[in-house]
């Protein structure tokens, strides 16, 4: 055991993860060594002009997939995805076992995998777990720990060779027979395929699964034929209702609006609110409302932004079309308007997760970000943020781009209600550290805004007002405690069921098995 | 005079709203033990409201509690529990005659003296929710020094008037005007009833503009999102502010010179005009609340 830079006891060896665990020592401390990983060379002659195979099982056979190997998936089809379940069903039927699955994220629809976990088809998950699978894992239902990485940490792990992908299965809303892929059109269109690029580049074998096989060449190619080994056509790769939402509406919940108003005011009062501002917000209630207030402030003060980043909604598309952004950089398209925009507007750019957030390249997008608005399950007196575990200690959420954007942006704002029901969100010490306090600049609650004392420059620049009540993080923690009382501590065992990597591959925290109630 | 543009109702059985209501910066909060609480929950809500009053800092909002009606078995218990917690006033429903206020005044005085609260500290806002209450408005407003505001009812009043809600609330025009008249005659605040369609921002703005024009000083509020709209309507325009500044400055100079009369732009200005100018600046957030 040794204590890392956020005060967590981390074993030097974690079975099923690494024998030589790298401790988190600070947000910019770990530097890469050596060369990038590369897959085997291959050649394809003019004699082969069709990569299609009749079904998923044929592709699994041709790919050389065997028990114990690592397979990867992307999550652009979100809760509408059929591909992960279809591939694992086929593996199970073919007697393939002990697989490590390496998804960019899993959703509720993947609870179907529970049976494959219980029967040993899946031995380990390196990727976010949520809902029923998260509960299963948290109660000790998997032998090997889940490994969680951020959207930038994942391509870093692949490119540096930490994780070797044997076969990447890519859900492709549109493909041609020679393996050109796009998410921009087709019955299961999802817009950007940003999270897929690194897998396509580095996996030993790449299998595209599509429900829209078009004549060669496919339009608006995102993943080119040079990277794809096989193409399989199926009836449906997903349910459009779960892939994109039709509309994005700003909340009317007064508390969320109040928090958003404070967050927007903070941005507006900061030195970053000027011509050329760039920002990223999520698609959640508070984030979107914050974006709406910031947009109004931009209009009012005649400010034009440079770029909007991240998961893209109609909201950012409208801002682009209104001229409030020069470009939007889209790693994931959340709604129909974003899907439609990506292929018709050259200023709406698809970016890979590597380009978006990988700390180990010559410069990712988050480094150019002025401000990001993020959520939290918990945040503590040291500004450490937890987005992974729930109040009962169960591992229920992925990291997403949280660590990456927080670390890159000049102004990282965490928005959260002070209490959810009776549960305080500002606490003495978070149960799990996802993002270290050193990269968090402000916490915005309905009871006021706490700026990280490390940001004296911000404290000097920002004047408190009726619309921007400044408090300290300790005051918030005390207030929450006063209203809700002390919480009973979470009961857990020593066994590690989850490893939380920082984006640089060091271990920032571990999650232990919870005691069954 | 304290601003009473927005008085936000907080259901007495909803801890979420009770602890957060003041964050939306209404001029006042009304912790409600009456209509928003079911009969079976009256005791629980009274305890919850008492504990919230003891533990939450309402950040400068005027804090009142709407008690149950004088025709119920709850109102005395309500008073006994909440008055010792340091509130500013009581909002009492369905007041019909000055006698109601005398009864309430007596009960409050008794609790004040038992708890070493300065006599007369607890103010009363009267809800006039029947035709009789509206008819007696002036006499109710002058029945006790504690009365500092009167409000017309909404749905209850419509029922008593044997009519129903219309799009323009035509049926409440007369009662509203009577309340305004009686309130100003009695030198108390006329405060308007709630606007119940919480999604109709435009309708709220129209109604608020009208009630402001006929002389109301504020409005009861049932949803936090209504607050900025009402504040916006009650916030003086740039022109009004400029004029008010001029008057207040002239009055100050006159006082310094020991002059009784104040003159602005060659016109004599009366004391009430100066007072109103000060009130205008206060509404614009440019002057601290006085008196």
Image (cartoon, helix red, strand yellow):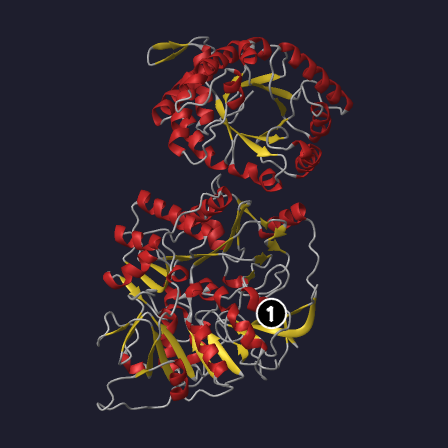
Residue A25 seen in the figure: no
The quarter of the picture where the C terminus of chain A appears is bottom right
Q: Residue at x 29, y 91 (%)?
A: A43
Quickly name the residue at label 1: A136
* Spot occupied by residue A488 in the image (x, y as percentages of width and height): 71, 57
Query: As drawn, which residue projects farthest toward the right?
Result: B114
**Front position in the image: A75 or A277:** A75
* Spot occupied by residue B107 in the image (x, y as percentages of width and height): 72, 18
Give the image quarter of residue B47: top right
The quarter of the picture where the N terminus of chain A appears is bottom right
Image position of B92 with respect to A400: above or below? above
* Spot occupied by residue A66 in the image (x, y as percentages of width and height): 47, 88
* Spot occupied by residue A393 in the image (x, y as percentages of width and height): 63, 63
**Front position in the image: B29 or A89:** A89
Near mark 1 (Cα within 10 A), the count class, few <14, some 14-19 or many ≥20, is: some
Label 1: state its secondary structure: helix
Q: Chain of mark 1?
A: A
**Front position in the image: A255 or B203:** B203
**Front position in the image: A473 or B215:** B215
Number of numbered discs visible in the structure rendering: 1
Image position of A209 with respect to A365: above or below? below
Give the image quarter of residue A225: bottom left
Residue A176 seen in the figure: yes
């Amino acid at each position: 055991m040794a204590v890392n830079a956020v005060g967590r006891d981390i074993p030097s060896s974690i079975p099923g993860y690494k024998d030589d665990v790298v401790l988190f020592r600070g947000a910019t401390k770990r530097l890469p060594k050596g060369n990038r990983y590369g897959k085997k060379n291959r050649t394809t002659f003019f004699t082969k002009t069709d990569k299609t195979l009749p079904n998923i099982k044929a592709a699994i056979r041709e790919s050389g997939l065997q028990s114990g190997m690592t397979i990867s998936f992307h999550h652009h089809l979100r809760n509408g995805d059929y591909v992960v379940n279809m591939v694992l069903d086929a593996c199970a039927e073919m007697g393939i076992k002990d697989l490590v699955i390496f998804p960019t994220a899993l959703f509720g629809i993947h609870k179907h995998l529970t049976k494959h976990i219980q029967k040993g088809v899946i031995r380990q998950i390196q990727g976010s777990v949520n809902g029923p699978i998260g509960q299963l894992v948290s109660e000790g239902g998997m032998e090997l720990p889940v490994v969680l990485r951020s959207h930038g940490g994942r391509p870093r792990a692949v490119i540096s060779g930490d994780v070797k992908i044997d076969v990447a299965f890519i859900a492709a809303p549109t493909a041609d027979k020679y393996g050109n892929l796009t998410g921009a059109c087709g019955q299961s269109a999802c817009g950007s395929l940003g999270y897929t690029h690194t897998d396509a580049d580095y996996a030993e074998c790449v299998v595209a699964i599509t429900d829209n096989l078009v004549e060669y060449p496919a339009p608006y190619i995102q993943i080119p034929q040079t990277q794809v080994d096989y193409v399989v056509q199926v009836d449906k790769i997903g349910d459009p209702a779960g892939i994109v939402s039709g509309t994005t509406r700003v909340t009317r919940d007064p508390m969320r609006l109040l928090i958003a108003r404070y967050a927007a005011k903070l941005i507006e009062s900061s030195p970053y609110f000027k011509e050329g501002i760039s920002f990223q917000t999520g698609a959640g209630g508070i984030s979107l409302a914050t974006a709406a207030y910031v947009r109004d402030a931009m209009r009012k003060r005649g400010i034009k932004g440079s770029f909007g980043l991240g998961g893209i909604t109609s909201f950012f598309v409208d801002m682009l079309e209104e001229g409030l952004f020069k470009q939007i950089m889209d790693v994931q398209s959340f709604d129909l308007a974003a899907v439609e925009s990506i292929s018709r507007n050259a200023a709406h750019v698809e970016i890979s997760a590597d380009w978006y957030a990988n700390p180990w390249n010559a410069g990712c997008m988050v480094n150019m970000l002025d401000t990001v608005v993020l959520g939290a399950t918990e945040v503590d007196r040291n500004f450490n943020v937890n987005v992974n575990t729930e109040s009962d200690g169960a591992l229920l959420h992925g990291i997403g781009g949280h660590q990456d954007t927080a670390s890159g942006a000049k102004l990282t704002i965490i928005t959260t209600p002070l209490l959810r029901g009776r549960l305080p969100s500002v606490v003495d010490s978070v149960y799990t550290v996802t993002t270290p306090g050193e990269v968090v600049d402000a916490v915005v609650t309905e009871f006021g805004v706490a700026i990280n004392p490390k940001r004296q420059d911000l404290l000097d620049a920002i004047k408190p007002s009726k619309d921007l009540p400044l408090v300290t993080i300790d005051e918030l923690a005390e207030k929450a405690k006063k209203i809700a009382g002390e919480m009973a501590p979470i009961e857990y065992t020593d066994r590690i069921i989850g490893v939380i990597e920082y984006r640089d591959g060091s271990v920032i925290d571990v999650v232990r098995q919870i005691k069954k109630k | 005079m304290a601003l009473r543009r927005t008085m936000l109702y907080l259901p007495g059985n909803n801890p979420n709203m009770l602890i957060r209501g003041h964050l939306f910066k209404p001029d006042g909060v009304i912790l409600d033990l009456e209509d928003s609480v079911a009969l079976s929950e009256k005791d629980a809500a009274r305890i919850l409201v008492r504990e919230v009053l003891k533990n939450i800092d309402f950040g400068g909002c005027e804090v009142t509690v709407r008690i149950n009606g004088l025709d119920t078995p709850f109102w005395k218990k309500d008073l006994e529990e909440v008055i010792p917690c340091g509130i500013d006033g009581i909002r009492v429903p369905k007041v019909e005659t000055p006698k109601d206020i005398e009864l309430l005044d007596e009960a409050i005085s008794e609790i004040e003296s038992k708890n070493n609260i300065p006599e007369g500290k607890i103010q009363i806002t009267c809800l006039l929710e029947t035709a009789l209450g509206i008819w007696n408005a002036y006499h109710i407003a002058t029945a006790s020094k504690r009365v500092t505001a009167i409000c017309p009812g909404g749905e209850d009043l419509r029922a008593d008037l044997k009519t129903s809600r219309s799009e323009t609330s035509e049926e409440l025009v007369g009662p509203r005007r009577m309340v305004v008249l009686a309130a100003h005659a009695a030198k108390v605040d006329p405060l308007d009833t709630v606007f119940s369609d919480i999604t109709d921002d435009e309708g709220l703005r129209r109604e608020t503009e009208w009630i402001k024009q006929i002389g109301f000083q504020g409005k009861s509020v049932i949803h936090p999102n209504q607050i900025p709209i009402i504040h916006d309507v009650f916030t003086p325009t740039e022109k009004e502010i400029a004029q008010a500044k001029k008057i207040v400055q002239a009055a100050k100079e006159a006082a310094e010179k020991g002059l009784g009369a104040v003159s602005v732009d060659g016109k004599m200005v009366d004391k009430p005009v100066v007072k109103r100018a000060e009130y205008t600046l206060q509404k614009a957030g440019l002057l601290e609340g006085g008196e």
